[in-house]
Amino acid sequence: MVGFDGDVLLFDNANFKCVRHHKTPYAFKLHVIKEAQRLGYDLALWVDASFWAITPVAEVFTMIEADGFLCQNSDYVLGQWSSDESLKHLGIDREEAFKMFMFSGGFMGYNLRDAKTLAFFEEFLHEADRGVAFRGSWTNRKQEVSSDPRVMGHRHDMVVGTHLLHKHGLKMHGSNSFFSYYGWYEAYKVEKQLEGKVPFVIEGGDREI
């Protein structure tokens, strides 16, 4: 990672145990942060495997410490990407959900000393363990998650995290604050153009959310 002198924690099935991804999608993200906390880390940044650091990231950790929780707007709203069951479980009306901006779960920074962030995180982890609002189909092509034609699928951790972000009054930064979406070939072409503007690009696959 560019200019990063901290620790990078890597896990697989051999050294990390939690509910399997196919049973509760993305619950492992919360358990990874919990493990970082257990190991004594105060600041933790989750980035998906497709993230590619193109500038030094020290400033990102400075912002995590200051903000408590760091995330970026996905350019979607909760109503587009949440199942009927998840909204019912979380006590959110569908129309209300269409007024709530959704954060991107591929980038999450935690200050594990911050009281508001800890309250948010513990509730997030609790919902991951319950699993109810995390489960659901990625698509809604056959009305798998909702009969509402505006719904495009379910986004698991992002649904729950977005609800809790609003509930706990945590800040969401605008799109392209910390990362931008590019295909792998485009990422190489634009690296120099974006250097100094965003710390990360996503070089894997086509953009969906």
Image (cartoon, grey):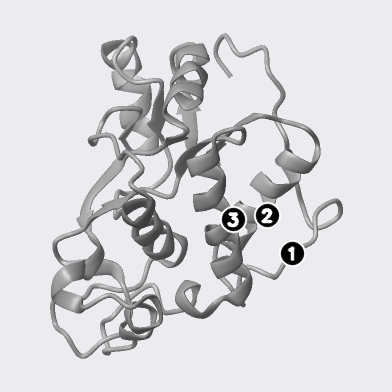
Q: Name the one closer to the observer, 170 or 79.
A: 170
- The residue that label 2 is drawn on is 31
Q: Where is residue 165? Give x, y as percent.
A: 37, 51
Left or right of residue 39, residue 99 in this image? left
| Residue 47 visible somewhere in the drawing | no
Give the alpha-carbon distance from disc 3 to disc 1, as whole Å: 16 Å
Observer-side mark, 2 or 3, equals 3
Counting residues from the start of the chain, the first of labels 2 and 3 encountered is 2
The reply to whether callout 1 and callout 2 are in contact (CB within 8 Å) is: yes
Q: Name the one closer to the observer, 195 or 17.
A: 17
Q: Amino acid at mark 2?
A: His
Give the alpha-carbon distance from disc 2 to disc 3, as whole Å: 11 Å
Q: Helix or strand or loop: what does disc 3 sit on?
A: helix
- The residue that label 1 is drawn on is 18
Query: What residue lies at 35% left-to-right and 28% top-to-bottom?
Result: 178
- How many numbered marks, from 0 up? 3
Location of residue 147 (image quadrant) = bottom left
Q: Amino acid at mark 1?
A: Cys
Left or right of residue 76, residue 109 in this image? right
Q: Name the one closer to the observer, 136 or 87.
A: 87
Q: Please tell me whether residue 37 is drawn above or below residue 194 in the rendered image.
A: below
Q: Where is residue 182? Give x, y as percent.
A: 31, 35
- The residue that label 3 is drawn on is 122
Query: What residue lies at 16% left-to-right and 70% top-to-bottom?
Result: 96
Q: Amino acid at mark 3?
A: Glu
